[in-house]
Amino acid sequence: MERTPSADSPEAYILRQPAERQIALNRLRDTIRAHLPAGFEESMQYGMITYVVPKSIFPAGYHVNPSDPLPFLSLANKKNYIALYHLGMYAEQNLLEWFTASYAALNIGKLDMGKSCIRFKNLSSIPYDLIAALCEKLAPEEYIALYQKGRADRAR
């Protein structure tokens, strides 16, 4: 598992990355911040830039560590790629299907994706407009409902 340099702010995190990655990370960060619905907050969580549902909106926090706010989207520099983790796609099949179809329609190459992690190895083909549209798809309240439903479904 790769180690990401620690940082206590998104700006410091980006400055600790290789110069060639800083431009893409800054542009992704700007895209996310401009297109996330009101209510999400930017923070550092698990060594990544993370957009969370703050405890003021969802006091229960993240089940893995209830003292942490609920993570929604994270941005990280890895050894061979930039990673965008979107937990809404993990929770909502229709959103995942929309994203994969929309990505394929761009004809920019094969989507490299895990359950919630989109890996961008070619920095020149990051689909910023698609990331912007993805960010707009779920408000904090919608994400909380998906999160709670998923937790309830797994408890059965």
Image (tube, rainbow, N blue to C red):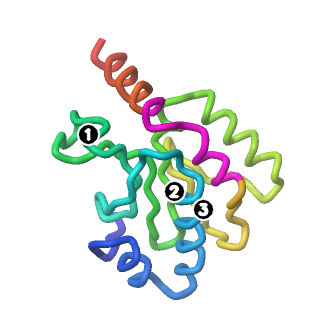
Position above or below: 6 against 137: below
Which residue is at a point 50% across and 50% down the rendered structure image? 117
**Nearer-N-terminus badge (2/3):** 3
Q: Which residue matches tag 1?
A: 62
Q: Amino acid at mark 1?
A: Tyr
Residue 41 in the magenta stretch? The answer is no
- Between 65 and 122, the one lying in front of the other is 65
Which numbered dot is residue 31? Answer: 3
Quarter holding the N terminus is bottom left
- SS state under label 2: strand
Name the residue at 32% across, 71% down: 3
Q: Are marks 2 and 1 in contact (CB under 8 Å)?
A: no
Front position in the image: 65 or 140:
140
Q: Residue furthest top?
A: 156
* Side of 130 relative to 13 (left or right): right
Residue interval drawn in magenta: 130-143
**In the image, which disc is placed on residue 84?**
2
Q: Amino acid at mark 3?
A: Thr
Percent position (x, y) of residue 20?
A: 57, 85
Mark 2 and mark 1 lie on one chain; the one further toward the N terminus is 1
Image quadrant where one finds the C terminus: top left
Please say if the residues under marks 2 and 3 sit with CB atoms less than 8 Å apart.
no
How far apart are labels 1 and 3 at the CA level? 25 Å
Disc 2 vs disc 1: which is toward the camera? 1
Within 10 Å of disc 3 (Cα), the crowding (few <14, some 14-19, many 20+) is some
Q: Main secondary structure of the magenta part?
A: helix
Residue 149 found in image quarter: top left
How crowded is the residue under tag 2: few (<14 C-alpha within 10 Å), some, or many (20+)? many
Query: Which quadrant of the structure image shows residue 81?
Result: bottom right
Secondary structure under tag 1 reads loop
Q: Quadrant of residue 136?
A: top right
Total numbered badges shown on the rendered structure = 3
